Every structure is written in C-alpha cells, then in structure tokens.
Image (tube, rainbow, N blue to C red):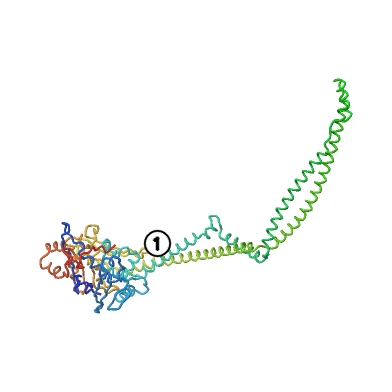
Amino acid sequence: MKLIELGANKPTFRTIYFNPSGITLIIGKRAEEKGNNTYNGVGKSFALYLVQFCLASKSNLKLSKKLPTWEFYLKFSIEGKDFIVKRSTDNQSKVSLNGEEKSLSEFSEFMLMSIFTIPDGVTKASFRSLISRFLRTRKQEYFKFDNFVYKEQDERALLSNSILLGLNSLLVEKKFLLKEEINKISDFRKAIQSDETFNSFFGADNDIDIVIKELEESIQKLEIKISQFEIAEDYSKIEEQSNLLSYQLKESNNQLSLLRETLKNIIKSLHLRSDMSESIFDSFIASLESELNIKVSERVSEVKAFHQNLTTGRTHRLNKEKTNILEQIDEEEKKQKLIASKYDTSLKFLNKYGALDDYVSVNQKLNEDKNALSKITTSIQLINAYKKRESEIKLVMAEDNLATEQYLQVEKQGHLAILMDSYRALTGSFYDDKKGGISVVNNDGQNKLRYKIDVRIQDDASDGINEVRIFCFDLLLLLSQINHNVKFIFHDSRLFANMDTHQRFSALNIASEIGSKDFQYIASMNQDTLDILKEERSAEEYKEIIEENIVLELNGDNPEGRLLGIHLDLDYLE
C-alpha cells in the first residue's frame, strides 16, 4: 500500500501529492503570532490525522462541529491498483471506497485482508491497530518505541507488534484470551458469592452439605403438609367464631370467680357471732347497776330485743343472697359448659382443616426453599466448574510457557537473529560507538502478555536517542515486510524535535535510500529544523535530500497558507 493524494471537497484545501517513493516532506514555516515565531495550527499534524481519518479511525464529533459539510479523501494503491476512499465529517460512520459505500467495519475488514497477512488461528488482529504502526499521530505515541496507539491495551499492542515482527502471534493471542477467561471466571465467582441468597445461607460457620440437607428436609416436610392440606370454605368464619367463644369462656371464668368469692364472703358473714354469752352479759349489767346505783336492765332488755331482731333479719337476708348466688353460679356453669362444648368443636374443625391463606403461606415457603436450593446447588456447580476450568487454563498456560521458551530458544539463531541484525544495521547508521539491539523474552507472569519485547541503544536515556530508537523500530517494521505490504511510514515533526543535526540527517539519508526499494517516507517538519540542516550540509546534499522532496509548505501568515485554507482552531485530538 502506497499513498498517492490527500484532498477535500473544498477548494481552499491544500491538496497533498505524495512522492511515489523516497521522501515526502510537508513543511511548516514560521508565522508571526503575537510577536512569537510559531508553527502551530498550520496543519502539519492535521495532515497525518486526516490520513488516519480516511482510513477509518474512530469518529470525531469535533470535526462535525468545526468542519460541517467537509469531505476528505485519500488516494492510495495496493499492489499497483488505485483506490480512493472518501469520508464526510457529517456522516463519519460510513466511507465511500471507489464509489461504493461501506461501514467502517466493512472497510476495515477489506483493508485488513488486502494489506495484511494474518497468521492462521489468530482472530483478534485489527486493521486499525496494524495500520497505526505506520502512522504515529498523537504526541503520546512518540514517547515509547512500541506505543503506536494512545491508550491501546498492552495485549492488543503486543499482538500487532508480534504479527509485524514475524513472532509467533498465536501464542500471544492465546495467552491474553486465556487470561481474560480467568478474569471473567473470577468476576463470575465474585458475583455468585455476593448474591443475597447465597450469602444468607453461607456464613463463616455454615457447612455447605448441611445447608443443602436442611433445605431438602424442609422441602420434603412442606410437600407432605401440602398434600394433606384440606381447605375449608368457611374456615375464616369458624375461626372468627372460635375467637369469640374463647373470649366468652374467659368472661364466664371471670364471672364465676366473682360469684364464688361473693358466696364465700356470705358464708363467712353467716358464721359471725358474739364472743360474750348471755349469762355473762346479765351478770355484767347487775354489777354495773349495783356500783352505779342506777336501773338499766329494762333499757338493756329493749336493746337486746332490738339486736336480736336485727341479727335475725341479717341472717335471713344473707341466706336469701346465698341462695341467689348459688343459682347464678349454677346458671353460669351451665352456660360455660355450653360455650366450652362449642369451642371444642371449633378447635377440632380448625385443627382438621386449613384456611386458603395458610395454604398459600405454606406453598410460598415451599417455593422459597425450592428456589433457594436450586440457586445454591446451581451456584455450587458453577463454582466447581469454574475452579475446574481455571485449573485447566493454568495448566495450558504452564504448557504454553514451556512452548514459548523452546520456541524462543530455537529462534535465537534464526528469525530473532535476523531481526537483531536488521535493527543493528539501522542504528549503526546513526552511531558508530553505540550498540543497538532487539530482545524478545518469554513473559511467564500471570498476565496477558506473552513476550517482553525491547529495543535498546546504548545510552538511550540521552536526548534524541529515544527518537532514534523509535525511528529505527518503525523502519524495521516497514522494511521487513513481514505479514504486510505497507510501503510507507508517516512521521510527525515532533519525532525530530529532540534529535541533533547529525541524527536528523542520518534519518533523512536512510529515508532517501529506502526510496530505491520503492518505499515512501513521509514526514512533516518545521522550518527551523531545515535551516539547521541547510547550515550543516552542502547545498547539493540539502537540495537532493530536502528541497526536491518538499511537496507542501504551510504557514499561518494568512488563512490561505494553512492546510484547510481557512483559519481554524485545530483542537481535533483529545
């Protein structure tokens, strides 16, 4: 795949025509803004972004808001066949490929099959991830050699890098899929164990077998009770009558107690009599008359007669009350006996039959226990199945660890040695005294990553060396042509910001040389970078490497000098 042309449906757009091979430079010239020289906002980085946009990058609402009605297109070739893809800012979910409308996924699938060779068995390869290895776009993608897509998952990045490096990518995909399955199993187990029903039966001291046995026994008893249950239509009415009879019995008992206490007091009153005999009383009166010389016997006789009449009347009245109380007791006892008989009949009925509410309640408890038993047994079965599967996965991962070790040991003298030599040849063009290398080792940790891939240059913590490492790694992927037929790389000007002059010119020399192998090296650069190169190199070198390969110069002096041909805040990336 090679890039031919980037354009838009607006006449103000500065169409970019890519050189068919070798270097293509897009230059940002100085613009005076508020007294400061700046290259910002002219569209250098935006050009790279628009290539990604035409190649089905994710939708960007900022474009639809800031550039409504704009449509961008990219002409490219694959194995000599030309294509043109168009994408509108208003309808970003679709693209047009040679006039045929496709969804982003359909277009990505077509490009994946047309440009990349996916190893047998690998199912998670992505066109967007793979093509981005040749189109570093965001600032964050220039921090590390293997960070091509901002916020890309490490395992997905490793898969794409492994495919393009010709490593066993099936081992890569297999490990991260197995680890994902383990993570899902862990999440499922946590979900089961946090279930309310599960927790209600499984405390710290609860034995699983005992809990299940108790539920089974409860279900059995409830089923027997349900089978023997007889529902009475008038159960509620009889239950109400029974409650009334129970109340009446209590009232009757209270009444009988009161009557019997009254009877007891009457009998006690009937037995009361004077403790002084009549002879003693007469002797006392005679003595009193003698000592006091008064005559009271006649008066006392009258009193005695009155008292005798009073006592006789009281006794008669008490005997009458006693008879009346005895009659009331007899009547209350007969009444109580009748109430007790009715109450006993009601209780026998209630004990034999049940109410519909009782039946529903028992049935509800039966269903609750059945559901609990079903959920618990199912949960236990799932947990056991998860444990078994987790053990199986760990066994497979252990076997794959061994297989990976054996594979890498074999390839140290084969494919890995070729990668090492190719990378060292690239870094050797920059430094005579700094050794470079690429290493691939097995990652046997409990994670999703199969390999640990690293590329190093001696003293690569120094300024500019990290950018050289990135440049060489990207060129390694391009020139190796492993599992792809991408013939270009597009770098942003930020790659060259920290390089010294020698490193910049070495990079451009390599880029020029790969043109003889029919590769494209596309880059944006700032004018100050070129000015330094011009001072350091001969006019002939500068012309051959730089001037003859500039296809577009952008500046912010006026809107027409910008990529879009209009003044716009190009805050298009998050």
Q: In this rendering, would 342 be left or right of 315? A: left
Which of the pair 33/279 is nearer the observer? 279
Percent position of residue 550, x then y: 16, 69
Percent position of residue 176, x then y: 38, 66
Q: Is 272 located above or below residue 468 in the figure? A: above
Can residue 444 be seen in the rendering of this structure? yes
Percent position of residue 415, x then y: 30, 70
Q: In this rendering, would 515 be left or right of 355? A: left
- Dividing the picture into quadrants, the one containing residue 96 is bottom left
Q: Residue at x 28, y 78 (%)?
A: 99
Q: Residue at x 23, y 57 (%)?
A: 462
Q: In this rendering, would 497 be left or right of 260? A: left
Circle 1: element type:
loop
Can you identify the residue that label 1 sits on? 446
Can residue 414 be seen in the rendering of this structure? no
- Dividing the picture into quadrants, the one containing residue 496 is bottom left
Give the residue type at disc 1: Gln
Q: Is 94 located above or below residue 289 in the figure? A: below
Q: Is 337 located above or below residue 232 in the figure? A: above
Percent position of residue 367, x then y: 58, 64
Question: Image quadrant for the N terminus?
Answer: bottom left
Question: Image quadrant for the C terminus?
Answer: bottom left
Which of the pair 270/22 is nearer the observer? 270
Q: Residue at x 75, y 45 (%)?
A: 258
